[in-house]
Image: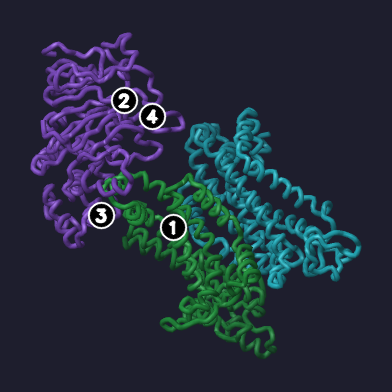
Amino acid sequence: MTALAEQGVPPGAPSDAVGTDQADTPLRRFLADFFESRVATGALVVLLGIVFIAVFAPWISPTDPYDLATVDIMDNRLPPGSESYTGMIYWLGTDGAGRDLLSAIFYGLRTSLSVGVMSGLIAMVLGSSIGLTAAYFGGRTDTLIMRVVDVQLSFPAILVALILLALLGKGVDKIIIALVAVQWAYYARTVRASALVERRKEYVEAATCLALSHRRILFRHVLPNCLPPLIVVVTVQTAHAISLEATLSFLGIGLPVTEPSLGLLIANGFDYMLSLKYWISIFPGIALLITIVTINLVGDQLRDVLNPRLQR
Amino acid sequence: MGSNAPTLRVEDLKTHFFTKAGVVKAVDNVSFSVDRAQILGLVGESGSGKTVTGFSILGLVDAPGRVVGGRIEFNGEDIANADEGRMQTLRGNRIAMIFQDPMMTLNPVLRVETQMMETVLAHQKVDRKTARQRARDALGQVGIPSPDERLAAYPHQFSGGMRQRVAIAIALLNDPDLIIADEPTTALDVTIQAQILFEAQKLCRERGTAMIWITHDLAVIAGLADKVCVMYAGRIVEAGAIDEVLDHPVHPYTRGLIGSVPSRNRRGVPLYQIPGMTPALLNLPPGCAFRERCPQADGACMAEPGLSVPFDGRAVRCFHPHLEAGA
Amino acid sequence: MSVFVIRRLMQSIAVVAVMSFIVFFGIHIVGDPVDMLINPEADQADIEAAMHALGLDRPAHEQYWYFLVNAFKGDLGRSFIFGEPALQLIVQRMPATLELAFAALFLSVLIGIPLGVYSGLHPDTLASKTIMSGSILGFSLPTFWVGLMMIMVFAVILGWLPSTGRGETVPLFGIPVSFLTLDGLSHLLMPAVNLALFKMSLVTRLARAGTREVVHQDYIKFARAKGLSPRRVVLVHVLKNIMIPVVTVIGLEFGGLIAFSVVTESVFAWPGMGKLIIESIQNLDRPVIVAYLMITVLMFVTINLVVDVLYSVLDPRVRLQDIRA
């Protein structure tokens, strides 16, 4: 146990430390508080549905939109509800290449969500570690780190992403790097702020007196108590990352055409919009919208529910 | 005691606040009148409804509060139910109000000049030059040195006492018939307090302005007011000429208040303290509101006492008024 | 005070230096500088001549120095696509972007403040709740998608407004602007609204929060007790107080408008810097990319510096804090 902790517990893990340290009641109370809002409950259900679609897209999509054998160019730009000559119904129509739009959206959600969540997780781990370091060591380390955070945050997200993508080029890995670069400073700032509060409390002093290692104190003791604000930032930043990725892909500087996210689908439909073939652009847009809005609604409710807990 | 037509006559005024938790009867059946050149002291602890009474007269009670009954006769006109337009022409013009905290009553981002001139321009058809002239004169009247320079200043460039003088100058701008002063000296130093009291009294006498001086401090109005109304839990419990009430209070609450003023006590004798706390006005129990803290309370006090006249010139709301002479 | 300005200035210079370093070495690490800085269609002799002219045959630190010296002279290379100096291309397109950004700023204030003040004065009405829900949408909807929807509704279906370009421009002090002609204005409207949406939501929320705080202040009740009209109480006494935080935030967010105009310009084919950089990234027109990045970073650092200094002039507490630090 100790050896394991000494090796460094990943910052994502201590969530179960909260579960074991405290009885089930706070969790249950938290859930009860959360489900008090009907809007948030509804948003959570929709969001879970979206996540389900994203995870199981290859199995639940009517067709594989990127399998050239099943895509018929003759079926291109069919309006919603049209029937292919094989008798299949395109519920949301087809795009410029004759792909079933519903399937393309399912796959697009998969790409958009995985890029958003992946970048969010990496940024959280990176940003939280940096924030913890700043708070724990204080002094010059803290000043230097927070200066960098301030300077970074004074630049708008899109400009930072633009600089990086202009230098790095297209690609899934590149866009994740760009999104992480945009987000990490928020995590660092949030974690530092709550860690500073925690650091002054007696239990950290007690842990220091027990001569526990820095890493153990940080990850096993301080970090779990920074979780509530962190959870809120995670939701907000993930929505933000998904939106930013869609924007960059729409602009043609994000994901390559081989990894079509929702932003790319919307961009593809843009050209047809002027000829009133609205569905190619609108349906992926609505999928994107629902994703972002539900995440934000869930995040809002989390903020409301977690805030009084912080003060308690 | 003044002429037959009072400047202001308030009759059975009721101002209630309709909160989610219940109805708060902040002002309940309050009656009094003020004549020209007369100063009425309205005394009570915080939460007794004296400020709300002032706001009710101006029609400035904000939601969830509302004047729900009674008459407010100003120069013979009932303004309790007057429309907003009418009230707007009266406010700051015929009826002016001075607030408690001078640090909060002036808008921090507007020049004193702007805040004074707008008061003139809102009510009188004069040009800006005349308005500015009046603002300057008013500052001079309340004893602000070099008013010309001070006009262009912002409130934060004034001290607390100076700000209250500015607020008083604003109240005087349109030569009102009635000034409601809501604890205007509470936040000030004692020396400045005395100056302001003196000036207020002088102005009132010189101009024939009626004045309601709201305070929690009997000592303040002792040398200032002509008559006094003591409020407790939204009701007037005792009213009469100031000297008589101070010399011979009949309501147990008034007696307690006077007993707790140091100057009225003999040296060496501990100050009297009214036991208990001001009752919460929300869902006030029936009967006399003071009975829980009253040394005289008995079974009779479970009923609500009406306003009675134990002798000429005095009204009291108590079943057991202290009527022996030489108290 | 001057200590603060000097410190802030040093920090800005440091940021610009770091950014020039990142951009310069980014190009050298990520790709072959010959590819990036020399027209790929040039023949071997040209390449060698160009390499020598650009100093590419020298060590990296010398090249960086060379890059900096040239940048100071205003030479950031020539565009592969246009064959013109990159800096000139960007400066030519700057007025269009600035016009769009200012129009958006103007709209977000003009619409955001009244909406915010209204919902702050009457927080429980249906209209206020609608405004607040709208501002949540304004925060979460991706700008580019809203732009597409606007084009579809107002340009394609209703045909009221043109969907692309700047329209007719007239010179104002020698700078071409759209807002002075009816045609230009009709072209400007949709992109400006699109770019403004996010900031409008922000301004609405700020104005609402400010109003809700201010209306309960004694000085507002005192203003009413003076017999002022509700109009004057709101327009002068309330508004003037909420303008301080709103103006501060607007100043800080102006840079954001310029950055986000990249999206709006691409959607509405607005011929500004943002559209140019996206096209340059797609066409790998590296000199223009480098020039854009350097110019934008410089612009940003300048805006932040000016806002910070102005803020410290306005708020004495900031100055004190800095002296103590």
> Between disc 2 and disc 3, whose residue precedes?
3
Inter-mark Cα distance, 3 to 1: 25 Å
Q: Chain of mark 4?
A: B
Of badges 4 and 1, nearer the viewer stands: 4
CB atoms of marks 4 and 3 within 8 Å: no
Left or right: where does residue A239 sit relative to residue B131? right
Tell which chain the image draws in green: C
- Viewer-side residue, B295 vs A136: B295
| Chain A, hue in figure | cyan
Q: Which mark is residue C245?
A: none
Q: Where does the image place residue B218, in percent across and percent down from the top left?
A: 18, 27
Q: Which residue is mark 1?
A: C113
Of badges 2 and 3, nearer the viewer stands: 3
CB atoms of marks 1 and 2 within 8 Å: no
> Between disc 4 and disc 2, whose residue precedes?
4
Q: Where does the image place residue C265, in percent across and percent down from the top left?
A: 58, 71
Looking at the image, which residue is at 31% across and 52% down? C229
Residues at discs 4 and 1 both on one chain: no
Q: Chain of mark 2?
A: B
Left or right: where does residue B220 sit relative to residue A160? left
Q: Which mark is residue B233?
A: 2
Of badges 1 and 2, nearer the viewer stands: 2
> Between disc 4 and disc 3, whose residue precedes?
4
- Disc 3 marks a residue whose amino acid type is Ala
Tell which chain the image draws in purple: B
Label 1 Cα neighbours within 10 Å, binned few <14 / some 14-19 / many ≥20: many
Looking at the image, which residue is at 64% across and 49% down? A294
Q: Secondary structure at mark 3?
A: helix
- Viewer-side residue, A212 vs B14: B14
Q: Quadrant of residue B203?
A: top left
